[in-house]
Amino acid sequence: MFNMNQIVGTHDILFITLDTLRYDVAKEYLTQRRLPNLAAVLPETGWEQRHSPGNFTYAAHHAFFAGFLPTPITPGIHPRPFALGFEGSTTTTENTCVLEGANIVEGLAVRGYHTVCIGGVGFFNKLNPLGNVLPSMFASSHWSRELGVTNPDSTEKQVELAEQILEQTPKTQRVFLFINISALHQPNYVYLPGAKTDTIQSHGAALEYVDSHLGKLWDAFRQRGSTFCILCSDHGTTYGDDGYTGHRLSHPVVWTVPYAEFIL
């Protein structure tokens, strides 16, 4: 674990959730060298296997923004990178950055960060009160249908928007950029030629599509200086596993997610 007290204030922070990405698919495609842009930045050990605090987007992200990121699958008390001040926390250590506020977004703003959200799935669409709950935590939030689950070019558009935001932000201004990547969420069959329904194969094809556009994002942050990055899934999803389809249910492939921390 990084010492976050040395990173906050000196580094930009990028937090990406690859919405709905299954750990087994993420690991398989990385091992098969089908994810060159992710392979270029992930630790040598690859994806870390972790447990999500939620089994669907809304629940998981509320936990994330409270400082409860996916936890290692091994038993034990695991320190957290970020925490909010409250009594009795056993996972707050000397390497944890303890922030002020109701969520870590607000806490990073207090530390001088410009906080930006680029939404993806419906819980970030800002079209109704529910869709405003998570984006409203940020000083600046963005969503349009071209960034959402129904646009096959969503990741390309999300990265283009991120590039514009970073270019317009002075390098002296620290940035906390959160992106909810929507392409892996259903419907993802559009990424597999000839497919008519979502399958684990189209899930993997969507991941390859996402990877193809991430290199530009890495470059945009490198032009600004050092960036601390968190990449993870919020939950997995089932494609007939043990008779289950979808998520918001308690199945191992839903709770088990890929996770990585690194510095660009």
Image (cartoon, grey):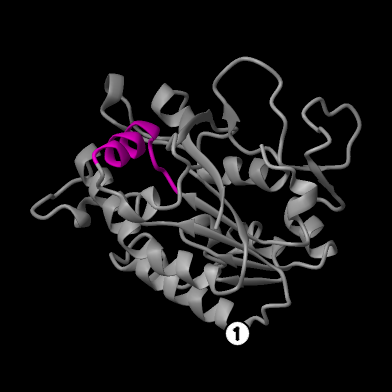
Give the quarter of the image for residue 221.
bottom right
Element marked by disc 1: helix
Tell me the quadrant of the picture where the C terminus can be found. Answer: bottom right
Residue 173 x/y as whole percent: 73, 75
Residue found 54% across the figure and 22% down from its top = 73
Which residue is tagged 1? 168
Tell me if 210 is positioned left or right of 71 in this view: left
Residue positioned most to the right: 87
In the rendered image, residue 102 lying in the magenta stretch gets the answer: no
Instruction: Name the one closer to the observer, 89 or 76.
Output: 76
Chain part drawn in magenta: 19-32
Residue 261 x/y as whole percent: 56, 44
Say if residue 187 shows up in the picture.
no
The disc labelled 1 sits on which kind of residue?
Gln
Residue positioned most to the top: 75
Residue found 87% across the figure and 52% down from its top = 100
Say if residue 242 shows up in the picture.
yes
Residue found 57% across the figure and 78% down from its top = 165
Residue found 75% across the figure and 67% down from its top = 113
